[in-house]
């Protein structure tokens, strides 16, 4: 079924355009926010239609020529074809509408902190094709598109991509399809190369060591375990005057130009002189950057806890404790015994487990700072906290992921 003159009034997080036709919402692949188009319906659901764009009838006033030659195929960016102010406006709208749907609260004039919008990422994760090509997934597909550069990644990684590609090709020439994924990270001085290896191919370790030995990179192979083959086992970042060690698998914010803004904002929301509990603390990046000292961290990953303790020692912290346990370990007695004043959470994109929210509320902790990379799960969790007696006090956004529909938010909730 063909639909004509559909106006695109919004963009989903995966980049599909949102329009309306025949009293149904229609989601259109490769649509541009603000344009009027014709499309063909590919699937009809009860409450919405899925479609593919046929042609543009009226160009979007927000359109810009995307600078990346892979944009039309690659799924890495979804809104590079929109001017940057429009990108920010769409992200504000996404947060505001998510909060309204969940809590029926109208947020007016939500502030969003802009970012350098190209060459901001300190990390990229690439697939490897059957031919050994470094690739991203295509838009709306598991198929791969070969790339030789990514305009989102820092120059320190970008200038090494072709050299790394050559090394992967050498490995594939000798051993076939043995590497699933390549993750590259930088602290601006060093390059960390993480190679995710198929489990039956660990015999290639010596070959990898040999071909990478003169590159100066730190190289890890990753499977059931992580093994350092060459160079340093970790990178070192500086945030707000603190040195943070990040190992191969440790979580670290990807946008170097926003990270201090992010933690300064959380710091401002919390105020001074408090002892904080950092759930999902990882290697203690958040808690050390936000509070400096007087922190307790809980993290299920034992290796991350080891790094957290090293980071505390390196920064000469005097009052800290890091515990390798699941977050559900938290109880009222623990909060009281550790004299916790506030909780900081920076969970994965899926947000917090509803039972954990109940546990946190049962401790009757007065303040919760929630750092989120997904407005919809954030709004859901704020609503769950609200049902447990908490009030949304402050919210502010940061554009941590320019050229995509992802956005970071920092929220302060207090007990009523």
Image (tube, grey):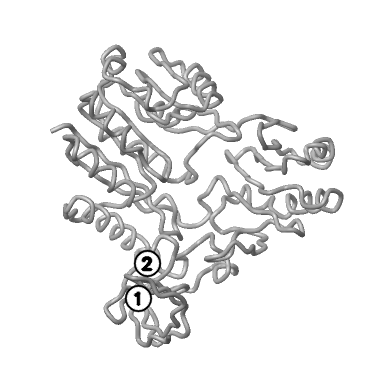
From the viewer's perspective, tell me whether residue 97 is left or right of residue 212: left
Q: In the image, residue 267 lies at what x, y percent?
A: 31, 32
Locate the C terminus and report the quarter of the image it occupies. Answer: top left
Q: In the image, residue 288 lies at what x, y percent?
A: 41, 26
Name the residue: 35% across, 82% down: 6
Name the residue: 42% across, 49% down: 400
Q: CA distance from mark 2 to mark 1?
A: 8 Å
Seen in the picture, residue 202 relative to 45 is either above or below; the reply is above
Q: In the image, residue 173 lies at what x, y percent?
A: 85, 53
Task: Name the residue carrying label 2.
Answer: 11
Judged from the image, the secondary structure of the residue bearing numbered disc 1 is: loop
Residue found at the very far right of the displayed protein: 174
Q: In the image, residue 368 lies at what x, y percent?
A: 26, 32
Dot label at residue 287: none
Locate the N terminus and report the quarter of the image it occupies. Answer: bottom left
Task: Name the residue carrying label 1.
Answer: 8
Cβ atoms under marks 2 and 1 closer than 8 Å: yes
The one of 96 and 387 positioned closer to us in this rendering: 387
Seen in the picture, residue 279 relative to 195 is either above or below; the reply is above
Quadrant hosting residue 335: top left
């Amino acid at each position: 079924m063909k639909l004509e003159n559909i106006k695109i009034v919004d963009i989903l997080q995966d980049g599909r355009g949102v329009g309306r036709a025949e009293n149904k919402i229609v989601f259109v692949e490769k649509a541009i926010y603000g344009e009027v188009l014709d499309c063909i319906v590919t699937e009809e659901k009860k409450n919405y239609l899925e479609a593919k764009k046929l042609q543009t009838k009226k160009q979007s006033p927000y359109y810009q020529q995307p600078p990346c030659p892979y944009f039309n195929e690659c799924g890495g960016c979804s809104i590079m074809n929109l001017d940057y102010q429009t990108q920010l406006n769409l992200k504000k709208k996404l947060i505001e509408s998510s909060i309204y749907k969940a809590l029926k609260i109208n947020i007016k004039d939500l502030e969003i902190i802009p970012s350098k919008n190209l060459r901001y990422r300190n990390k990229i994760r690439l697939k490897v094709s059957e031919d050994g090509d470094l690739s991203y997934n295509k838009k709306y597909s598991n198929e791969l598109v070969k790339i030789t550069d990514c305009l989102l990644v820092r120059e320190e990684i970008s200038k090494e991509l072709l050299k790394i590609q050559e090394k992967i090709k050498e490995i594939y020439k000798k051993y076939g399809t043995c590497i699933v994924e390549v993750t590259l990270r930088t602290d601006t001085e060093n390059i960390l190369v993480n190679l995710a290896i198929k489990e039956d191919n660990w015999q290639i370790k010596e070959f990898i060591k040999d071909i990478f030995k003169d590159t100066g990179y730190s190289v890890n192979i990753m499977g059931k375990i992580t093994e350092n083959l060459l160079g340093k086992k970790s990178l070192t970042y500086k945030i707000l005057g603190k040195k943070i060690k990040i190992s191969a698998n440790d979580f670290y914010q990807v946008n170097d130009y926003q990270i201090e803004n992010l933690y300064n904002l959380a710091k401002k929301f919390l105020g001074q002189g408090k002892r904080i509990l950092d759930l999902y603390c990882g290697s203690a990046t958040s808690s050390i950057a936000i509070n400096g000292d007087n922190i307790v961290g809980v993290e299920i990953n034992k290796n991350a806890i080891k790094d957290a303790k090293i980071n505390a020692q390196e920064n000469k912290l005097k009052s800290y404790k890091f515990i390798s346990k699941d977050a559900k370990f938290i109880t009222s007695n623990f909060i009281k015994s550790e004299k916790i004043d506030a909780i900081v959470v920076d969970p994965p994109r899926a947000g917090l487990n509803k039972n954990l929210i109940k546990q946190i509320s049962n401790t009757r902790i007065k303040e919760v700072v929630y750092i989120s990379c997904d407005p919809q799960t954030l709004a859901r969790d704020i609503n769950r906290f609200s049902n447990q007696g908490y009030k949304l006090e402050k919210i502010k956004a940061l554009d941590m992921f320019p050229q995509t529909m992802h956005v970071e938010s920092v929220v302060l909730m207090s007990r009523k």
